[in-house]
Amino acid sequence: MQEQNYFALRSTRVVTSVGMRNAVVVVKGDAIEDVVAAEAYSGDAIDCGNLVISPGLIDPHVHINEPGRTEWEGFATATRAAAAGGITSLVDMPLNSSPVTTSVQALEGKLTSAEGKLNVDCGFHGGLIPANAAGLGPLLESGILGVKAFLAPSGIEEFPNVTETDLRNAMPLIAESGLPLLVHAELASFPQPLSEAKGLTASKDAKILRSAQNWKQSRPRKWENDAVALLIRLCEEFGCRVHIVHVSSSEVVPLLRAAKQKGLPITAETCPHYLVFASEEIPDGATQFKCAPPIRERENKEQLWHALREGVIDFVASDHSPCPPAMKLSESGDFLKAWGGIASLQLGLSIMWTAARTRGFQLADLSRWMSANPAVLAGLE
């Protein structure tokens, strides 16, 4: 090992799995070799004083969109933003790239697209759609880190949502692989297409279409609650690892708590936008706040913080979903037609620390939510 590839960092605030420590982080090559108590280390070290040294963040829910929609985001810009925000590993979702990552061939195309463009480590989730539900074997063996499915329309035509029947066909195969099934959990409880909920599309009234409250009410908590209840039943039946992405409804917390108490292999994440914003504060026409599930009430937000504190919600992921600014339709403010997604990859750490510290959380909590627990989902523990 060449001498210039070795260094050590000393700080009174090193975040470890057993709490904050006065320690030295020893690095050789491109890997951390050891973390030792400061008093036990006698070699040279760069003294960082009381600056925090913390594990890099892991974000297992990022929409990079390359190939096919690279003008929305690409590997070069996404991973540069991740590095700037303290993220050292991320996992790319199977949409909104084109083609979507629902086959080994599409995955190979995505790997080719990423060559020479990565500023951080990057893994990939595969996709479950009705067309591949019974034949997932090759994709499960291709090196993906998880399988993503939607129970509601995804917004991408090439990535249709699955039904309970599709899940029943796929879950035995996923369970055998040991990979997690990641699910967008919204289940419409009436027969209209999701976009017609609450008569939103029937209206030509610009005031109604610009209403942030109408958008929230068009995707009620019940949809999320019903979807999570279904997934818990299927998780118990098939023994398949299930991960609920972007929890927005605090009403699913008791369901998740009971499932975990049973010992079911189920985990859940929420996102910075559900922990920071509140629907009461979103002006009409402010489509930059549009996402699905929608941002909910202030009281709901605080319940999500309680669930994080308890560990019922396991971690925080970005659900980074960028688009060209014009697709947010800021001029018309039409919540129905605007692209739904929050772009926050570079900002998650600062956002979360700002919000968490006012609620009495410590840096170790942040590391658990944004490093240790997501590492388990991604197989990096």
Image (cartoon, grey):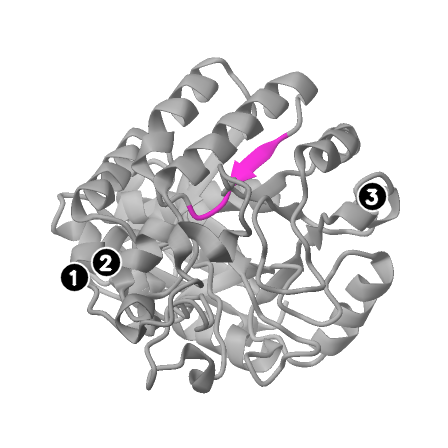
Three-letter amino acid code at disc 3? Leu
- The quadrant in which the N terminus is found is bottom right
Disc 1 secondary structure class: helix
Residue labelled with disc 2? 277
Q: Residue at x 43, y 84 (%)?
A: 325
Q: Residue at x 34, y 73 (%)?
A: 288
Disc 3/disc 1 C-alpha distance (Å): 43 Å
Nearer to me, 236 or 185: 185
| Amino acid type assigned to the residue bearing label 2 in the image | Phe
In this picture, residue 13 sits left or right of residue 175 = left
User: In the image, 379: left or right of 209?
Assistant: right
Q: Indicate which disc, 3 or 1, sits on the residue closer to the N terminus.
A: 3
Give the residues drawn in magenta, as a range: 241-246
Q: Which residue is tagged 1?
A: 281
Q: Secondary structure at mark 2?
A: loop
Type of residue at label 1?
A: Glu
For mark 2, does the 10 Å Cα neighbourhood hold few (<14), some (14 to 19), or many (20 or more) residues? some
**Disc 2 vs disc 3: Cβ atoms closer than 8 Å?**
no
Residue drawn 49% across the image and 45% down it: 245
Label 3 Cα crowd, 10 Å radius (few <14 / some 14-19 / many 20+): many
